[in-house]
Amino acid sequence: MTYLDHAATTPMRPEALEAYLSVAREVGNASSLHATGRRARRVVEESRERIAAALGARPSEVIFTSGGTESDNLAVKGIYWARRAVDPRRRRILASAVEHHAVLDSVAWLEQREDAEVTWLPVDRTGRLDLAALDEAFQRYADEIALVTVMWANNEVGTLQPVEQIAEIAAAYGVPYHTDAIQAVGQVPVDFSASKAAALSVTGHKLGGPTGVGALILRADVACEPIMHGGGQERDVRSGTLDVAGIAATAVAIEAAVKTQAESAAFLTTLREELIRRVGEAVPSAVLNGPREQRLPGNAHFSFPGCEGDALLMLLDAQGIECSTGSACSAGVAQPSHVLLAMGADEDLARSSLRFSLGHTSTRADIDALVKALPGAVERARAAKAVSRH
Amino acid sequence: MRVLAAMSGGVDSAVAAARAVEAGHEVVGVHLALSRNPQTYRSGARGCCTLEDARDARRAADVIGIPFYVWDMAEQFHTDVVEDFVAEYAAGRTPNPCLRCNEKIKFAAVLDRAVALGFDAVVTGHHARLENGVLRRSVDLAKDQSYVLAVLTPEQLSRALFPLGNSTKAEVRAEAAARGLAVANKPDSHDICFIADGDTRRFLAERLGKQPGDIVDAETGEVLGRHDGAYAYTVGQRRGLGLTRPAPDGQRRYVLSITPVTNTVTVGPASALDVDLVRGKAAVWLTEKPTEPVECVVQMRAHGETIPATVTVEGTDLVARLHRPARGVAAGQAIVLYQPDPDGDIVLGSATIDQASRQLVNTA
Ligand SMILES: Cc1ncc(COP(=O)(O)O)c(C=O)c1O
């Protein structure tokens, strides 16, 4: 089997799995006051410290969540509500047009249900934020803005965003900046305090931890309304009994991913460049989407003109090659990617794309298998698209 | 063979897929997403398209142990089935959307795509027998679906597999239960999948708007009432006419015809519904196109009665002379020709009903 979908989720690192199992064997609610509870609490707090250290944050800034989706929802909705409560004029959200659905749909929901006004920020053909447009939006709406949210790295086409410039502009206007760094951590250097962001989302399962555990790194001075109410376990911003084993494993995974980031990035970039080159040789009509530089090391994303991505995916899957059309789906139906549309692709081209994403278990043999299967699959998919045209 | 199993999320298509696997085929399950907005469609075994149906289909594929994908057919379905449905009613005809879906979606758009992707055939859970190009009624006459398959051409049928034709619905359900398929007890749907609340009249009214016109008596030409849109009426219909005046002869009135040009609904007594000459357009022949008149039986609506007839070919049309009158024959429905056979009546061909009239004085 050739797994080229590490951006969807990547295998757990052995040390994270070990950590998970050893903690999961123990009983313990981290909120209990007895010795068992204290033992569990200690694991949580040590994990918090390790994550904080790895990401350039203070331990008190780490709020554990059930994963990236919750972190994004909490940041976007929570900060919006908190800002609006203090100043009812602050109802505008600036968001890039290429956010993950966890951000995109949270913003859209606030617009529909919570009186938010939204400025969708455009990107260029490579998916990179248009800083001039951001500047303009800030000037125009200066004292109406509740928050700005722009991801660190795009999950579909791998584009890295100018996080520091965004944070700088936001800081100049005193507006909190949230960044979804879920794809970035472990792939590129991510330092929370250096970034000057107010909030940052991270999840365990994209870097070798378990699914269902993540964190929102939230600066202490940034107010955030909870979206879930209960025991108030996490700074009163997030409630729910903590998943101690998952947290321990996530901490191990984040630490390992950050520690090995530079060498892993070098390894993945080499492999990725080979993948891009050989896909181009095998299928000369393939179009690489996203930037050549300023890109996640493990990401390669192509359009195959004349094909439909879902047909290609099925054909490759039948040969044991697993990849993604990149976009989220409801009943499993691929919608044309909002990311590619925002980058200026037409619907046809957007529907013709596939993402191949590499990770810590990828090898050159994966690329061999891909380029062997790809030309035949493209030919078939083209024929299938041609018959559906009439 | 490499076979694509169209899995609706119902019990029939799940068992059909399982049987295809058992027959030694390499099977891939595909659920057809027919609505961009799945919540608005109706759940059911018939063939559609809610999120729940997609989930049921996926679970069935898991249990059977085959790969599973969802294909987005929403655009084609909307154009070829939903819009066609509305346009047919607007033209005063009574369409059968299930038949159209088989003709244009399952055994056209889906089949063509499947063949291009390297599949040899499409397997569905339709209740009909198909062997060596011969299409017969299912052994379960109450569930027989040969009528809605009779529009398929020999080429389309040559790439179709219907593994359920020799089983009754009860047997299919029992088999599903034995195979551990959770859909074993899922209720059948008999409604049009894209009309969520089952209210066809309202569905049409929303799309075609109010078009008030007269309800006219066939014999006297008298206006007996008004309607809000002729499209809401079907030949043979008695209920819901809302006549403001009794008919001159005091008898019950039935819809005899719909005339879109003048926007009138013509009504008359039950006896005036009887027809014995039916013309069908765009005939499809599963056998050689006949050169001589054919003695057969014809069926003119899903689960309708069969009537002996003599059918002749006229160019691409066919003309059926019924040996006894039929009642309530609506343009737009299919006329399907069967050759009675002790091993299951054989489909000879079909056409879309264009006109129906009375030639002979009733001799019955
Ligand atoms: C950029 C981005 N944001 C958010 C998410 C959601 O994270 P999770 O799967 O942990 O809910 C993902 C992954 O699916 C992602 O890639």
Image (cartoon, coloured by chain):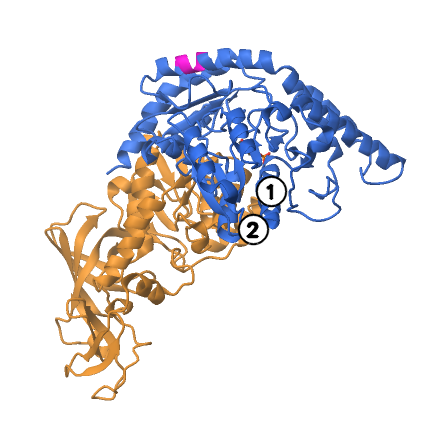
Chain colours: A blue, B orange
Is A348 situated above or below A184? below
Q: In this view, does B73 lie to the left or right of B94?
A: right
Chain under callout 2:
A
Q: Is residue B21 left or right of residue B152?
A: right
Is disc 1 surrounded by few (<14), some (14 to 19) or many (20+) residues within 10 Å? many
- Foreground residue, A229 or A221? A221
Q: In which quarter of the image is the C terminus of chain B?
A: bottom left
For marks 2 and 1 on the same chain, the one whose residue lies earlier in the sequence: 1
Question: Where is residue B175 drawn, in percent x and y?
Answer: 53, 48
- Foreground residue, B132 or A260? A260
Look at the numbered disc 1 and give the secondary structure of its residue: helix
- Answer whether labels 2 and 1 touch (C-beta < 8 Å): no
Look at the numbered disc 2 and give the secondary structure of its residue: loop
Name the residue type under label 2.
Answer: Pro
How far apart are the two marked residues, 2 and 1, measured between alpha carbons?
13 Å
Name the residue type under label 1.
Answer: Ile
Chain under callout 1:
A
**Ligand 1 in which quarter:** top right
Magenta stretch mostly in which secondary structure?
A: helix
Residue at 37%, 39% in the rendered image: B122
Q: Does the magenta stretch include residue A318?
A: no
Q: Is residue A54 left or right of residue B226?
A: right
Question: Where is residue A239 drawn, in percent x and y?
Answer: 71, 44
Residue range (magenta)? A274-278
Res. A360 visible in picture: yes
- For label 1, the residue is A79
- For label 2, the residue is A88
Number of labelled discs? 2
